């Protein structure tokens, strides 16, 4: 076994070292950031799954990397750059990908262009290589006090908007044709929700990195969908699962010094497998999920 890997695994359950690291401000800030991100991911995730937006989330997170790398190159806030990049991407996805048959190709085209810019920006950056690499895989020291303030502000905005649009959004996500016939602004809601997803994905980049942010935005919600068809229960479960993955991943990664994203994705995947097995045993229907239909406003 690789010596570095073996050493990291041997230190994984060094609780004394973990406790010592918990005394540092940057670790406490990372835990708070992880908890806030878990809350956002749990609230938004079930709607993402219902609207089948997993690829869009992937594209948005990748393009938040473009904004973050631009911020890094220009010497401005990486967090603000990530949010700006993801919001621009989300708006473009919402406007250009309104037709289902065009959506995937639009996301693929914009994502490829954005990733090309990311490579250029990271190549042009003269700072430490580790800083640019952390945008891909995340790092526990990333948030900081300034990043935590930005995270709290963005989280408050996202949750407030979600509370305001949740019921019509759920209706439009379940049956868009019927929702449109009843006067629900389906297209406007799609763009607004895409922007909220973009902001959340951008916030997640600093913790778990652009490549693996889906572990928080998709996996907990997909796991919850196997246990219940109730939108409220699904959201509560998704929040719980996302919190376990985010906060638990940070705690376990401290002593061995392994990238946070490795444990966040691992915990999320284990939760998903357990929920899938439990869901199958309960319903005996090969894991199929039931979509709630009583959501009309």
Image (cartoon, rainbow, N blue to C red):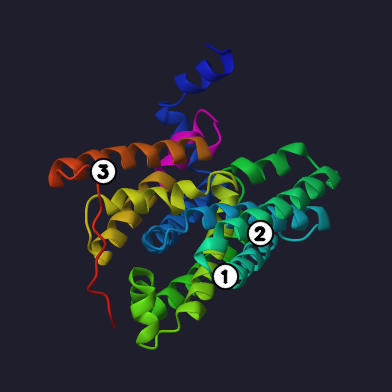
> Magenta residues, as a range?
247-260
Where residue 55 appears, as percent x and y from the top left, is 52, 53
Which of the two labelled residues, at mark 2 and mark 1, occupies the earlier sequence position?
A: 2
Crowding at dot 2, Cα within 10 Å, few <14 / some 14-19 / many 20+, comes out as: many
Task: Measure the C-alpha gap from mark 1 to mark 3.
Answer: 31 Å
* Apparent side of residue 273 relative to residue 133 in the rendered image (left or right): left
User: Can you identify the residue that label 1 sits on?
Assistant: 94
Which residue is at the far top? 1
| In front of the other: 90 or 217 | 90
User: In the rendered view of the protein, which quadrant contains the C terminus?
Assistant: bottom left
- For the point 76% across and 49% down, the residue is 116
Magenta segment main secondary structure: helix
Which of the two labelled residues, at mark 1 and mark 3, occupies the earlier sequence position?
A: 1
- For the point 52% across and 39% down, the residue is 260
Crowding at dot 1, Cα within 10 Å, few <14 / some 14-19 / many 20+, comes out as: many
- Secondary structure of residue under mark 3: helix
Of badges 3 and 2, nearer the viewer stands 3
* Apparent side of residue 70 relative to residue 292 in the rendered image (left or right): right
Crowding at dot 3, Cα within 10 Å, few <14 / some 14-19 / many 20+, comes out as: many
Task: Measure the C-alpha gap from mark 2 to mark 1.
Answer: 18 Å
Where residue 173 appears, as percent x and y from the top left, is 38, 70
- For the point 54% across and 57% down, the residue is 56
Tell me where residue 149 sits by quadrant: bottom right
Where residue 90 appears, as percent x and y from the top left, is 59, 66
Which of the two labelled residues, at mark 3 and mark 2, occupies the earlier sequence position?
A: 2
Q: Is residue 237 magenta?
A: no
Tell me where residue 106 sits by quadrant: bottom right
User: Can you identify the residue that label 2 sits on?
Assistant: 82
User: Can you identify the residue that label 3 sits on?
Assistant: 275
- Secondary structure of residue under mark 2: helix
């Amino acid at each position: 076994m690789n010596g570095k890997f073996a050493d990291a695994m041997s230190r994984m359950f060094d609780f004394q070292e973990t406790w010592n690291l918990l005394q540092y401000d940057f670790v406490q800030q990372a835990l708070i950031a992880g908890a806030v991100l878990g809350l956002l991911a749990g609230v938004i995730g079930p709607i993402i799954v219902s609207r089948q937006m997993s690829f869009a989330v992937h594209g948005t997170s990748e393009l938040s990397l473009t904004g973050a790398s631009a911020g890094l190159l220009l010497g401005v806030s990486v967090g603000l750059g990530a949010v700006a990049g993801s919001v621009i991407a989300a708006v473009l996805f919402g406007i250009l990908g309104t037709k289902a048959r065009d959506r995937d190709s639009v996301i693929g085209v914009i994502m490829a262009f954005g990733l090309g810019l990311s490579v250029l920006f990271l190549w042009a950056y003269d700072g430490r290589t580790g800083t640019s690499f952390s945008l891909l895989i995340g790092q526990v020291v990333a948030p900081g006090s300034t990043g935590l303030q930005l995270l709290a502000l963005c989280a408050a905005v996202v949750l407030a908007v979600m509370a305001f649009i949740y019921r019509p959004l759920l209706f439009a996500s379940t049956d868009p044709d019927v929702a449109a016939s009843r006067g629900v602004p389906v297209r406007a809601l799609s763009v607004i929700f895409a922007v909220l997803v973009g902001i959340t994905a951008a916030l997640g980049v600093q913790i778990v990195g652009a490549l693996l942010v889906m572990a928080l935005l998709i996996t907990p919600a997909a796991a919850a969908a196997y246990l219940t068809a109730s939108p409220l229960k699904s959201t509560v479960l998704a929040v719980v699962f996302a919190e376990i993955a985010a906060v638990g991943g940070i705690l376990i990664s401290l002593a061995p010094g392994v990238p946070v994203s490795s444990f966040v994705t691992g915990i999320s995947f284990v939760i998903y497998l357990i929920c899938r097995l439990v869901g199958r045993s309960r319903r005996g229907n090969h894991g199929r999920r039931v979509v709630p239909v009583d959501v009309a406003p």
